[in-house]
Amino acid sequence: MKPKKIWANFGVENLEQTTKFYQQLGFKHNGASDKLTSFFFGEDNFIIHFFLKNVLEEGVKGKICDTNAGNEIVFTLSADNIEEVNQWAVEVRKAGGTLISEPEAFGEGYYGFVFTDPDGHRFNVFHM
């Protein structure tokens, strides 16, 4: 089998808050409805749909992860240099995200940090 496309679906509590957060970080909006808001990520336009949590659970026929208790998945956003990583940290805080770790070196040649969006979805920002 050869899928035409792959994308991610996350559950959120507040579509307006989610839309504002990702727009403030500069991601391109991919549209919205009364059930979801969607954004493009990266040069390849990877799509993440942010569904209202109850809508997503109904669609997948079961519970989704409680982001306060664990991680669904951790996406990594690449940065061109250390200064860009540091700027991401500033922008994430300003947009209402939570830094789980401050920008720091991770072994030889790695620099980055971990943050969550307002619904607790985790992302890394790394320069490698």
Image (tube, rainbow, N blue to C red):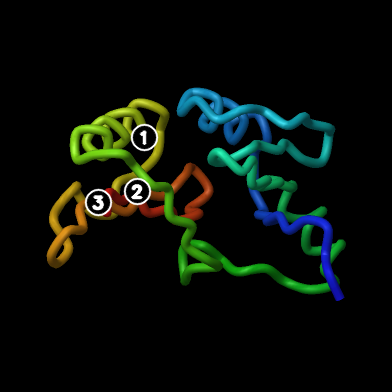
Q: Pointers 2 and 1 in contact (CB under 8 A)?
A: yes
* Residue at 67% across, 68% down: 64
Q: Judge by depth and name the residue closer to the eye, 99 or 45.
A: 45
Mark sitting earlier along the chain (3/2): 3
Q: Judge by depth and name the residue closer to the eye, 23 or 66.
A: 23
* Residue at 26% across, 30% down: 87
Circle 1 sits on which residue? 92
**What is the number of the mark on residue 58?**
none
Location of residue 28 in the rendering, given as x and y in whole percent from the top left corner? 61, 27
Residue lying farthest to the front in this orientation:
2
Asked if residue 115 lies left or right of residue 68, the reply is left
Residue type, numbered disc 2: Val
The C terminus - image quarter: bottom left
Circle 2 sits on which residue? 125
Circle 3 sits on which residue? 112
Q: Is residue 44 above or below residue 60?
A: above
Q: Pointers 3 and 2 in contact (CB under 8 A)?
A: yes
Q: Secondary structure at mark 2?
A: strand
Report, in whole angstroms, how far the alpha carbon at label 2 lies from the one at label 1: 10 Å
Location of residue 96 in the rendering, given as x and y in whole percent from the top left corner? 40, 33
Q: Which of the 4 quarters of the picture holds residue 62? A: bottom right
Report, in whole angstroms, how far the alpha carbon at label 3 lies from the one at label 1: 13 Å
Mark sitting earlier along the chain (2/1): 1
* Residue at 41% across, 28% down: 95
Residue type, numbered disc 3: Gly
Q: Secondary structure at mark 3?
A: strand
* Residue at 13% across, 64% down: 108
Q: Is residue 119 above or below residue 39?
A: below
Residue type, numbered disc 1: Val
Q: Judge by depth and name the residue closer to the eye, 37 or 107.
A: 107
Give the label, 3 or 1, closer to the camera: 3
